[in-house]
Amino acid sequence: MSILTAHGPRGQESKNSIYVYRFQPSDGSLVLVHLIDSKDTSSIINPAFSRFHPRRNIVYTCTEDCENNGQIFAYSIDKNGMLKKIGQADAGGTSTCYLTLDFNQRNLIATNYWNSTLTVIPLDTVTGEFTGPIKSMFDLKGGKENQAAAKKSGGVNHSLNDDSTIAARQRDPHAHALVLDPFCGCVAYVPDLGKDLIRELLYDRNKGEIQLELNYIPSGRLLAAKADGPRFIEFHPYFNTAYAVNELSSTVSVHIMWFASGCTI
């Protein structure tokens, strides 16, 4: 199956799409226990990100493709680390790169890098399996089409970091992750590599929908001559501090965050 990516990968396609290792804490070694062959019926093409369910032996993995919607695969994990496909859902956007579970594990939120959509997919709160198609979608482009093309369609190779490539990458929004606030899970923080900022969005965890944009945090341009390109954000477990990884400037920025004392949603 042919796929179109934003980056220009080199080398040969891997025979196996997912590898499962057992970690040995005593000596730090990894032991291969399972892999999914490309001929396997549960195989997944170009996996980009995986997320474990916090209460069930389930892992969700998404695919990345600029032309076709990403697919999210749900696998159960047995005591030996073997994977069994138990479900599949459409991510509702292209180049899916990040998966988030909300606080009550009622929904899985998919972040789609290429067309910058955020989609909410319902889950069974008991089994962790998909219970239906996309519940809601939030488009950071406001319904507009992408201006820039991907590598195979005449666009730039996103693996490059020269000025012209960065300019092309920043013609469109490119959401790279979605992290919910650590207190009540009703504010979604979305690093937007394309527009060089971190978006703050209101997430209604009962309705399972992103409703509006509350604010945005400029990257700060840590290197004055180059965009930062926020890729991921992580909150400190005790302080109102967040750390953003910036792909284009290869920096980490520190942000003081102010959260409301309660959540009305």
Image (cartoon, helix red, strand yellow):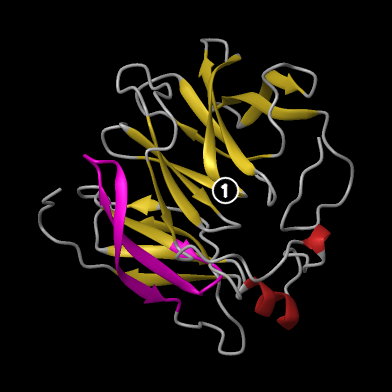
Q: Quadrant of the N terminus?
A: top right
- Seen in the picture, residue 125 relative to 220 is either above or below; the reply is above
At 68% from the left and 75% from the top, the residue drawn is 168
**Is residue 221 part of the magenta span, yes or no?**
no
Residue 147 placement (x, y as % from top left): 64, 71
Can residue 52 be seen by looking at this rendering? Answer: yes
Residue 185 placement (x, y as % from top left): 25, 47
Q: Is residue 217 left or right of residue 155?
A: left
Q: Which residues are magenta?
A: 191-219
> Which residue is outermost to the top?
79
At 11% from the left and 51% from the top, the residue drawn is 264
Quarter assignment of residue 167 = bottom right
Tell me the residue that label 1 is attached to: 97
**Is residue 211 part of the magenta span, yes or no?**
yes
Asked whether 77 or 31 is in front, the reply is: 77
| Secondary structure of residue under mark 1 | strand
